[in-house]
Image (cartoon, rainbow, N blue to C red):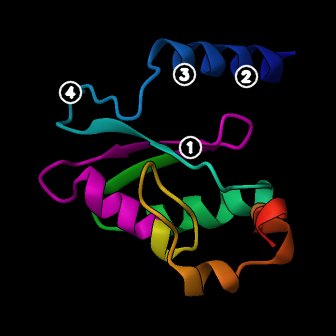
Amino acid sequence: MTRRLMAFMVAGLLILSAGIFVSCSTESGAEVAEIKLPTMQCMMCKENIETALKNVDGVKAVEVDNKKKLARVTFLPAKINLEQMEVVVTTAGYDANAQKADPKAYAELAECCQVPDAK
Ligand SMILES: [Cu+2]
């Protein structure tokens, strides 16, 4: 029940902040950016992308919504910008906003993580 409610709240927030890139300031100087992940397929993709982004200096938190195919990243603008975060995602083998996935990294993804009609 609580999980359902949370899911609805998250969905509501995402709808409110529709757009390729939305950022807003928070108290700590951190900002929140959204990265569209059109080629992600499953929970393994979610893990891959979250892990890749979390390991980057300047990224404070990552939440990937695998239904909406969207990452919500809390980051420090003094350390990293959206373009650099998109590169982290493409290097992991996934499209990020308008940036295309690194073909070699994409080819190394598990079969379930590759786009079905692109095979
Ligand atoms: Cu996957």
- Looking at the rendered image, the disc whose residue lies closer to the viewer, 3 or 1, is 3
Q: CA distance from mark 3 to mark 4?
A: 21 Å
- Looking at the rendered image, the disc whose residue lies closer to the viewer, 4 or 2, is 2
Q: Which residue is mark 4?
A: 27
Q: Secondary structure at mark 3?
A: helix
Q: CA distance from mark 3 to mark 2?
A: 11 Å
Indicate left or right for 74 with 115 as reference. left
Q: Quadrant of residue 50?
A: bottom right
Residue 108: x, y in percent? 69, 86
- Looking at the rendered image, the disc whose residue lies closer to the viewer, 3 or 4, is 3
The residues colored magenta run: 63-89
Q: Which residue is mark 2?
A: 7
Q: Residue at x 44, y 19 (%)?
A: 17
Q: CA distance from mark 2 to mark 1?
A: 12 Å
Q: Nearer the viewer, residue 64 or 111?
A: 111
Indicate left or right for 10 with 119 as reference. left
- Amino acid type of the residue tagged 4 in the rendering: Glu
Q: Secondary structure at mark 1?
A: strand
Q: Nearer the viewer, residue 49 or 27?
A: 49
10 Å neighbourhood of mark 2: few (<14), some, or many (≥20)? Answer: few
Which callout, 4 or 2, points at the residue further toward the start of the chain?
2
Which callout, 2 or 1, points at the residue further toward the start of the chain?
2
10 Å neighbourhood of mark 1: few (<14), some, or many (≥20)? Answer: some
Q: Looking at the rendering, in which quadrant would you find the C terminus?
A: bottom right
10 Å neighbourhood of mark 3: few (<14), some, or many (≥20)? Answer: some
Does mark 1 have its CB less than 8 Å from ligand 1? no
- Amino acid type of the residue tagged 3 in the rendering: Leu
Q: Which residue is mark 3?
A: 14
Q: Which residue is mark 1?
A: 63
